[in-house]
Amino acid sequence: MVLLDGLPALCVHLAFDNFAQTLGVTLALVVAYRCFVLQRDDLPELNPRKPYELTDRRRVHEFVQNSKQLLAKGRELYAHKPYKLMSEWGSVVVLPPEQIDELKSDPRMDFETPTTEDSHGYIKGFDAFDADPSMTQVVTKYLTKALNKLTGPISHEAAIATREVLGTHPDWRELHPAKDLLQLVARMSTRVFLGEEMCRNHEWIEASSQYAALAFSVGDKLRIYPRTVRPLVHWFMPSCWELRRSLRRCRESLKPYIKKRKSLAGAVDEQGKPLKFDDSIEWFERELGPNHDAALKQVTLSVVAIHTTTDLLLQTMTDLAQNPEVLHAIREEVIHVLGSEGLSKISLHGLKLMDSALKESQRLRPTLLGSFRRQATSDIKLKNGFVLRKGTRVVVDNTHMWHPDYYTDPLRYDGFRFFNKRNTPGEDKNTLLVSTSANHLGFGHGVHACPGRFFASNEIKIALCHIILKYEWRLPDGFKPQPLNLGMTYLSDPTIRMSVRPRKPEIDIERLTSQTA
Ligand code: HEM
């Protein structure tokens, strides 16, 4: 009986003890969680989960629809301080631009992991989005170094492509600029990447342009699913099958050219010298050896280079159509500089007002609302004591480029803005299109800043010289372009229409081109 009496008592005692222990352990875990885990998360959150929400679906959806407004709100609420945000790139810490300079060259800030992850580079079909350092090496070591000798060929292709794309009929003609300018830029770029034969190969130009556009839209569809299920779910998505077909089409269209090149590798020219190629296939081969996937590298090059460049050209032409006084001043500049110095890398450098207008268009409408996307590979303590925890993803939002703390009269388009700064002592730093800084993140900043910006800048200037001298253009009456804002992406109005008609050029740029080549 004692035993029986004692057992329940013991059980109650033990149960109580267990309860107390459980409570104790739970409390300890909560405290530990708050101290160690929440410490990583103790930043304010711009768009937190609601108490009943089990997933981030609503938050991501709302961010994608209203990112511009949300980021502006974040700037207002947490000016100059970091905060957390749920975006289509997952959970990110938004850093104030003032903190970039401390981190821009820090090797612990990984560029490749978040870039590959966010653009699904680990999924079949998105292979061209697998961020790879060889791309930067090729651009920096070969493309940028070759800019001097590339001015002639790029301009030569621009002459042919503008005639074909913008036409020669004396009447006004409507363009679909997002498509037509893409073709122009694709031809000029491919002239450099793959040479004269491939830049006029319609199948390659169309296949590669279509792949990039499709990958961006399919990528958005895939982002609806949580990251953990994406490696599985894509096998059941018809849009992903289509993307894989599109990549196969790119490979197929390049195959004959790559094969022909290989068979010519041992051949000699008329003078008996071995045939040497100086194109991007050759550059990648020098960096990666003969066994790399040459076709895939070309698709990646097209993805990173062509749409971005087209977007800046289109935005600049749109802004100039709305600001004819700037357009006329740039035309005068082109006539004066090219007329007196000819066409060369150096004279392109002398197009200071054009450079300023390009940088201003990029300031007001960068291609991304979030730049400097990085992931900390270990804990990083900043000078102000803030600790960026290992694994944290960061971005710097670009809305500061529209804020009076950074630019005077920031929402007004002023094509002369950077031209005037360049000539003002004390303000003359980082005023070139290609110079990156925390204040202007159009090309990112730091060790991973866009390496292709020198090429892009020259290419757009050459295209604009041809267009400005040979054409006038206008937007439909009363049309106010509305940029397309989807999450972190911020693009030119895709519905925009423009009319063009030929004009009599004051100088013969084609003659200048032949003197350059
Ligand atoms: C107007 C045209 C372009 C714009 C607006 C642009 C923009 C950017 C931006 C914002 C980044 C990320 C930088 C960062 O996070 O700090 C980037 C990276 C990159 N861009 Fe561009 N880009 C353009 C043209 C090009 C061209 C023409 C090429 C190649 C020929 C190119 C190749 C690359 C590469 C390889 C990277 C990755 C850099 C790395 O891995 O460190 N881009 N670009």
Image (cartoon, rainbow, N blue to C red):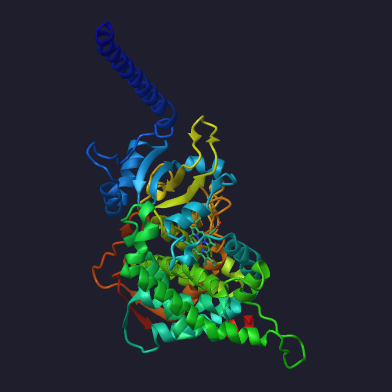
| Quadrant of the rendered image containing residue 136 | bottom right
The C terminus sits in image quarter: bottom right
- 184 up-or-down from 31: above or below: below
Judging depth in this view, the residue of 339 and 315 nearest the camera is 315
Specify whether 59 is left or right of 149: left
Judging depth in this view, the residue of 335 and 408 nearest the camera is 408
Specify whether 485 is left or right of 126: left
Image point 44% across, 84% down: which residue? 203
Q: Give the x, y percent position of residue 309.
A: 46, 68
| Quadrant of the rendered image containing residue 514 | bottom right
Residue 101 shows in the view: yes
Query: Tag count in the figure?
Result: 0
Q: Give the x, y percent position of residue 394.
A: 45, 45
Image point 59% across, 75% down: which residue? 151
Image point 44% across, 41% down: which residue? 96
Farthest-out residue, right: 272
